[in-house]
């Protein structure tokens, strides 16, 4: 199993935001649900959630190992994000303070600092384009979640009302030539995402990423200090370029 770099391990997940340029034709029932969810998140000046992630790692033998992580994310618009992940392969935290993204590998006590644009959307696009890595669940963090989740889709479908745990959800499906992604949105109460899954169709073994949202808070109290990085004692700073995944490390 190839060893990922510091930031790549932190950024498990993907972004669909820049997958294509043409606006897709979205099935009307999918559009209605997704726009309500997108409007709710866009109207929230801050939010926080906790998610359980299941990630397939395809070994050299072809066997798919299932890895799990627990992730928490807190966001305050226009330019503050903090994310923390703990699990089978990652013990890391990242801070975006409106000027830089700092990634701390807590297991090895090392960190890297990236200079970035000063708002969340521009920061997400910048680190994806310049370093070929993305924040986990980046599509949910964009100011226009509808655009982020539908850009690049050549197929959409409304699959009905299906359960996530004990919550009835609208089950939405999207696809293009190399990805399939699904979203479950609560059908009762606030129209919040409850589950998100991506299948990488063009990669060996067709690995899958699944996030199940365990909790949501649309009005958290987020102090400025939450988004400020302080280096732990003895932490080693890495060069910013070292977080970009080398070609041979790409899945």
Image (spheres, rainbow, N blue to C red):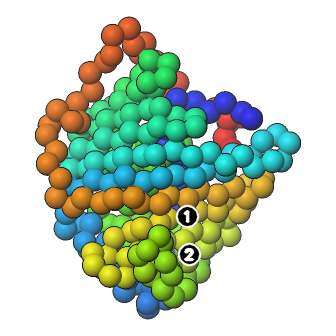
The single residue placed furthest to the front in the displayed view is 166
Which corner quadrant of the image does residue 43 belong to? bottom left
94 w.r.t. 14: above or below: above
27 w.r.t. 37: above or below: below
Element at badge 1?
A: strand
Is 42 positioned to the left or the right of 206 in the image? left
Q: Position of residue 178 (x, y in %)?
A: 67, 64
The single residue placed furthest to the right in the displayed view is 61
Quadrant in which the C terminus appears = top right
Residue 174 numbered mark, or none: 2
The residue wearing badge 1 is: 197
Measuring 32% from the left and 67% from the top, which residue is drawn there?
Answer: 144
Residue 77 numbered mark, or none: none
User: Distance from label 2 to label 1 (Cα)?
Assistant: 10 Å
Which corner quadrant of the image does residue 166 belong to? bottom left
141 w.r.t. 84: above or below: below
- The residue mark sitting in front, 2 or 1, is 1
Q: Is 133 or 186 nearer to us in this picture?
A: 186
Measuring 71% from the left and 63% from the top, which residue is drawn there?
Answer: 201
Measuring 67% from the left and 30% from the top, which residue is drawn there?
Answer: 3
Evaluate if marks 2 and 1 touch, with contact meaning CB atoms under 8 Å apart: no
Q: Position of residue 185 (x, y in %)?
A: 41, 75
């Amino acid at each position: 199993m190839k060893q990922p770099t510091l930031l790549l391990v932190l950024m498990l997940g993907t972004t669909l935001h820049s997958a294509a340029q043409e606006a897709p034709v979205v099935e009307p029932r999918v559009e209605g649900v997704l726009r309500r969810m997108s409007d709710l998140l866009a109207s929230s000046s801050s939010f926080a959630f906790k998610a359980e992630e299941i990630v397939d790692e395809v070994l050299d033998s072809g066997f798919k190992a299932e890895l799990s992580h627990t992730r928490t994310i807190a966001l305050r618009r226009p330019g503050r994000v903090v994310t923390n992940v703990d699990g089978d392969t990652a013990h890391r935290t990242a801070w975006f303070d409106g000027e830089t993204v700092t990634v701390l590998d807590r297991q090895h006590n090392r960190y890297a600092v990236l200079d970035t644009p000063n708002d969340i959307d521009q920061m997400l696009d910048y680190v994806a384009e310049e370093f070929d890595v993305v924040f986990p669940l980046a599509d949910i963090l964009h100011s226009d979640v509808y655009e982020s989740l539908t850009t690049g889709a050549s197929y959409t479908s409304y699959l009905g009302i299906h359960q996530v745990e004990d919550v009835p959800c609208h089950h939405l499906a999207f696809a293009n030539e190399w990805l399939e992604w699904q979203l479950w949105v609560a059908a009762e109460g606030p129209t919040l995402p409850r589950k998100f899954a991506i299948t990488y169709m063009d990669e060996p073994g067709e690995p899958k990423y699944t996030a199940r949202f365990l909790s949501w808070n649309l009005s958290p109290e987020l102090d400025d200090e939450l988004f400020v990085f302080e280096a732990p004692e003895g932490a080693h700073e890495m060069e910013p370029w070292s977080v970009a995944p080398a070609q041979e490390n790409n899945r």
